[in-house]
Image: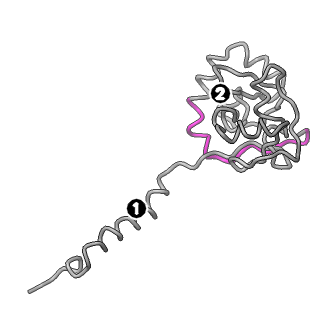
Amino acid sequence: MSRSPAAALPAWRPAALFALIALLVLPAGIARAGEQYTDREGRALNGYDVVSYFSETGPVPGLETITADHNGASWWFASEASREAFLADPSRYAPAYDGHCAFALADGRKVRSDPLAWQIVDGRLYLNFSPAIHRRWQSDIPGYLARSEANWPALEAGPAARPSRWF
């Protein structure tokens, strides 16, 4: 009489072996989230309080004493209340495209952004490379966003843009 190796194993072992293989194989097929664009010090938005963009005053500098880490970046906040709001729902406040220039993404490139060239569209924070590029982006926001959205899946997992000598 012949026995298969599986028949010799207790009933739980094949299931455990399958689970172990799934844990090792499945993450390889999952797309890695993109890197947040940061300045040379590893700060998102060059240290501006991301929650403040959604206030009437607009962006204000954060404090190095009130921070949080998220998506590989250090986020600075002007108050504990801003930090807590961000930590409660980072996806609500974090800029689109991991903080890269929305205009450049429409052209299929990840490019750094200027935290003072910004706009909130439909509740989402978008950044641009410079005030001049921001003005161009404003000439056709729906068109640029459609192209950026189409390009983003292929660009997201790539490395973040690096800061230039300016910031």
Q: Which residues are magenta?
A: 150-166
Residue at image position (72%, 35%) is 100
Residue 159, percent from left and from top: 68, 48
How far from the left and from the top, in percent, is residue 153? 56, 38
Q: Nearer the viewer, residue 54 or 21?
A: 54
Q: Is residue 51 left or right of residue 148?
A: right
Depicted 5 relative to depicted 130: above or below = below
Q: Alpha carbon of mark 2 to alpha carbon of mark 1: how far?
A: 37 Å
User: What's the amino acid at mark 1?
Assistant: Ala
User: Helix or strand or loop: what does disc 1 sit on?
Assistant: helix
Outermost residue on the top side: it is 139
Of the 4 image quadrants, the one containing the N terminus is bottom left
Question: Where residue 99 appears, x then y in whole percent?
Answer: 72, 36
Quadrant containing the C terminus in the rendered view: top right
Q: Which mark is residue 22?
A: 1
Q: Residue furthest front?
A: 81
Asked whether residue 152 is drawn in magenta, I would say yes
Q: Quadrant of residue 66?
A: top right
Q: Does 10 appear in magenta?
A: no
The label on residue 118 is none
Q: What residue sits right under mark 2 in the picture? A: 106
